[in-house]
Image (cartoon, rainbow, N blue to C red):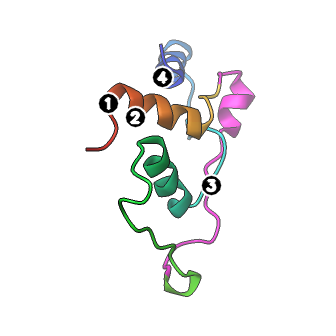
């Protein structure tokens, strides 16, 4: 059972209420996320990535979600984002 399934089961079984984020720990920019996908799939160099210049971005500088409510209720957090991404790409065959 994945951490997401376990969290969902916990919410149902224990009638937990509130706003819960269930996200992989760690943080990265959208650029780093895209670079990691290309690296894990062996596609580095096949696509050119360009980081968004701060002045061109209409989004917050820092907007990482936190699993505080999971920690407070003793629910296990998911694995770190890079490990989860690699497992997902391995399971789905990556990008074609």
Label 3 neighbour load within 10 Å: few <14, some 14-19, many 20+: few
Residue annotated with mark 3: 64
Closest to the camera, between mark 3 and mark 1, is 1
Per the model, the C-alpha gap separating discs 3 and 1 is 26 Å
Disc 2 and disc 1: Cα gap in Å?
Answer: 5 Å
Q: Toward which corner of the image does residue 63 lie, by quadrant?
A: bottom right
User: Furthest residue to the bottom?
Assistant: 55
Task: Give residue 37's position: percent from left, percent from top.
Answer: 45, 48
The tag earlier along the polypeptide, 3 or 1, is 3
Say which of 57 and 36 sits in front: 36
> Residue at left 58%, top 71%?
60
Q: Is residue 46 left or right of residue 29?
A: left
Which structural element holds mark 4? Answer: helix
Q: Secondary structure at mark 1?
A: helix
Residue 58 colored in magenta in the image: yes
The single residue placed furthest to the front in the displayed view is: 45
Highlighted range, magenta:
57-76
Camera-side residue: 16 or 96? 96
* Badge 3 element: loop
How far, Cα to Cα, is label 2 from label 4? 23 Å
Q: Residues within 10 Å of mark 1 (few under 14, many from 20)?
A: few
Q: Is residue 18 visible?
A: no
Query: Which residue is more in the foreground, 63 or 16?
Result: 63
**For mark 1, what is the residue?**
92
Mark 2 or mark 4, which is nearer to you? 2
Q: Which corner quadrant of the image does residue 64 belong to?
A: bottom right
């Amino acid at each position: 059972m994945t951490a997401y399934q376990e969290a969902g089961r916990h919410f149902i079984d224990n009638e937990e209420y509130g706003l819960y984020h269930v996200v992989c720990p760690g943080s990265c920019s959208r650029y780093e996320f895209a670079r990691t996908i290309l690296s894990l799939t062996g596609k580095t160099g096949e696509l050119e990535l360009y980081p968004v210049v701060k002045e061109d971005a209409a989004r917050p500088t820092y907007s990482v979600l936190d699993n505080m409510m999971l920690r407070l209720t003793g629910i296990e957090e998911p694995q770190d984002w890079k490990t989860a991404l690699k497992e997902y790409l391995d399971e789905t065959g990556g990008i074609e």
